[in-house]
Image: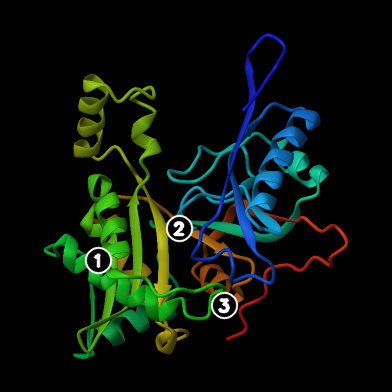
Amino acid sequence: MVYDANGTPVGRVAAFINPKTAHTEAQPTGGMGFFECVNDQAVANMLLDAARDRLKQEGMQAMDGPINFGEKNMYWGALIENFTDPPIYGVNYNPPYYPALLETYGFRLYYKQLFFKRSMEVKAQPIFHRKFNQMKNDPDYLIRDARGRSVEQLADDFMTVYNAGWVDHENFKPMERAAALKIIKAMEPVMDPRILIFVEHKKVPVAFYISVPEMNEIFRYVNGDLNWIGKLKFLWHKWRGTVKTMTGIVFGVAKPYQGKGLEGAMIVFAEKIVEAGLYRDTILTWIGDFNPRMIKVCVNLDAVNYRTMATYRYLFDRSLPFERRPIIEK
């Protein structure tokens, strides 16, 4: 924490190390997050110096930020484009001057995180409908939502697809069942099983499109206070269908099935939710600019890149050459 002369807090930061990923980079790399700062470069420098020095003491040679302790799908990166649309649930929001504070300090762009949005009232292109119909008529394939699935079954489904779909990603570590179960249980209070979409091939999950209702469309009625009245308001608006946007938090296809149209087929499956009057828009979870294949899928689905975040990296040895996140070529 940094305080001004009157004792008023003007900034905060946290430095931390993820033992699962810190030593998988070209250099030991820690994390910087929970960064909040007034528009004052001197204050930002004090905070970031403190984070750097602490990580140096622990043997780190670089830091990424602003990031989170946990998985990359939530509260990861700094907002750099589109500060006017409402914040997305589970996504960092910061004032427009944050990128300048970080870049002036010496952080460099490691990768961009692209959020895509599309109207579910606009039908997907005919080619995706043809693929959906082919899969629907193929007894080896099943496209379904999560209704009727237990938390344990969902965790198994999630883990299976994740481990088969993320193998080419940097620092990939197979997800364990306990971690998958923790993720699903964390989602449970806001989960709508109708928008948890899976594809199975020969009864094995091979793709998923996991969304949750955009909770900020409810939280604005709660005024930030989840006391007993706030909780009643939350449950009321959730029950009456106030939320019209579903936010995709993870979207993936097992490697052997990538490029076969499963992504579009899941979007077509989701269109029946719109026909039922439940949701109108979907936000697709961020896709790194290092993943051109998935960006192409979003563009082909007529989704628009409407918000961009950035993950920055700072090398402690300023004489070393900086390299951006490698492109996934496979």
Residue labelled with disc 2 = 71
CA–CA distance between discs 2 and 1? 16 Å
Residue type at mark 2 is: Glu
* Relative horizontal placement of residue 279, taking residue 145 as reference (left or right): right
Residue 293: image tag: 3
> Does dot 2 land on a helix, a strand or a loop?
loop
Q: Which residue is painted at 20% across and 36% down in the image?
A: 240
User: Is residue 262 in view from this perspective?
Assistant: no
Give the answer, above or below, for where 297 lies relative to 117.
below
Foreground tag (1 vs 3)? 1
> How many marks can you see?
3
Give the answer, above or below, for where 8 lies relative to 302.
above
Q: Which residue is painted at 40% across and 75% down in the image?
A: 174
Earlier-in-chain disc, 1 versus 3: 1
Where does residue 121 sit, x and y in percent of width and height? 38, 56
> Does dot 1 land on a helix, a strand or a loop?
helix
Rendering quarter of residue 225: top left
Where does residue 35 sit, x and y in percent of width and height? 61, 38
Residue type at mark 1 is: Ala
